[in-house]
Amino acid sequence: MGVVLVGAGPGDKGLLTIRGAECIQKADVVLFDRFVSDEVLALIPDSAERIDVGKSAGTHPVPQEEINSILLEKAKEGLNVVRLKGGDPFVFGRGGEELELLAENGIPFEVVPGVTSAIAGAAYAGIPVTHRDYASLMHIVTGHARENNVPDIDYEALVRAGGTIVFMMSVSVIGGICKGCLGAGMDRDVPAAIVESATTNAQRKFLGTVGTLPELASENSVKSPAVIIIGEVCRLSDRYDWFGERPYLGKRVVVARAKPGVSKLSEKLREIGFIVETGPDVRIEPLEPPGSMLDEISDYSWLVFTSGVGVSVFFEYLKEAGFDIRDLRHLKIACVGSETEKEVAKRGINTSYCPSEYNGAALARGLAERVESGERSLLARAKDGAEDLTRILTEAGLDFDDVSVYETIREPWKIDIGDLDCAAFTSSRSVESFAEAAGDSDLSKIKAVCIGERTAATARSYGMEVFVSAEAAIESMVDKVKEVFDDSQD
């Protein structure tokens, strides 16, 4: 037990170290800064306490002294404490200050270095901070000083030493920085760059010179987090800019959550450049096991699932009740969607029926054609499951038991649809949740990519412009989102 200072990196989840991820996943308590990305925060276990101690320039909702005290207090309780910091804990991250109180009190600690934006921000803008032909050394400088004072920077020493200069936490004083460099004798035509939200799909890069960079920042309303890079290496940016070539970089998509955990759809979209926002926070609450029905499992001919979560919860019930997988060998399995089918396959079981349409109504119609007289079905699904499934089965005269094995709890959320390019939905409930989050906003301008006709119908009911994926699968959803954006550029 103790405290681990973990550098979360500059934003891209892929830049978090393996050791950092291991520590986060073992944490009982996590204190995190505002620049830690949502994708990294998603690694925090549901069981862990989250404490937001985010600080911005000039605004410290949780003072540093209080952060230090919280770390000490939680560690003394015998908990695994992770202090999650953007970038690297020791590169202008005040990590050393946070360790002082721990060291004084004999609290064991560990430091997991992180990738600093001073290097990663430049790299994601196609700028090598050192290069044999341009710079053999680099300087990392902070433009932020205690109590918002003017930073004490020896510009003459920096200019005299040459090489690449990277300024961190300096957007608000960019004018003073460039003035200081020019005053120390730097040529106003020396190449310079500013990289906003580096390593994320919201990244913006602006190239200029020491003389023009402040105006560029002002004209484009550049905000923190951002890094300023000054030096001849900036000339290489356009030639080496690999990240800026992503075709959908900066395009904003909302993926409305239907289930907890990391969204595969969100991950796929981020890989090709989309800024993806997800919501709401969702958690699954397993309900009481359907004891008597499990005891009567031999009396059923069909086992029906409408989600991968339902599969996981149901088989966990079987495991806890001491069932052997061979006890299900007589059952035929029906499910909705390829993702649910994959969850069934993980148990070494093949599905007998999975409709091409991603909705309960299609599943019910298919079952009505396949379930024979005298066969009994067990539906294991969410408490708030769609009524179409049971209604159609009832109308068909089928014998079934509808069992709620879990409940989906969705936290309230709000979303600004002002500059939203597209929204993606994998269920009718996710559409409804999105509409609730949008409040009184006009949804008629929303391009809604839906995974099936039932979901599409719900989106249309809110006036959205609807596009339906060819298949009920994540890859097909990604293809449809790309198609929507490509068509809008024509």
Image: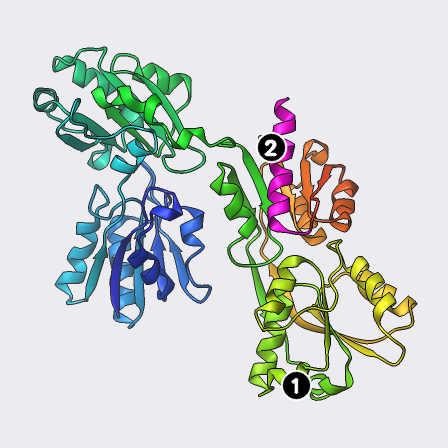
The kind of residue on which mark 2 rests is Asp
Give the residue at x 36% y 21%: 206
**Tag nearer the camera, 1 or 2:** 1
Magenta run includes residue 476: yes
Q: Mark 2 points at which residue?
A: 421
- Residue 29 appears in which quarter of the rendering? bottom left
Residue 397 numbered tag: none
Whole-angstrom CA distance, mark 1 to mark 2, is 49 Å
Q: Name the residue under label 1.
A: 327
Q: In this view, does 479 lie above or below 238?
A: below
For marks 1 and 2 on the same chain, the one whose residue lies earlier in the sequence = 1
- Residue 211 appears in which quarter of the rendering? top left
Residue 464 picture location, percent across and down: 73, 37
- Residue 150 makes an appearance in the image: no
Residue 255 picture location, percent across and down: 59, 45
Local secondary structure at mark 2: loop
Give the residue at x 78% y 79%: 301
- What secondary structure predominates along the stretch shown in magenta? helix
Local secondary structure at mark 1: helix
- Residue 444 appears in which quarter of the rendering? top right
Contact, mark 1 vs mark 2 (Cβ under 8 Å): no
- Residue 244 makes an appearance in the image: yes
At label 1, counting other C-alpha atoms closer than 10 Å, the crowd grade (few under 14, some 14-19, many 20 or more) is: few
Nearest the eye: 448 or 472? 472
Q: Is residue 64 above or below residue 222?
A: below
What coloring was used for the rendering? rainbow
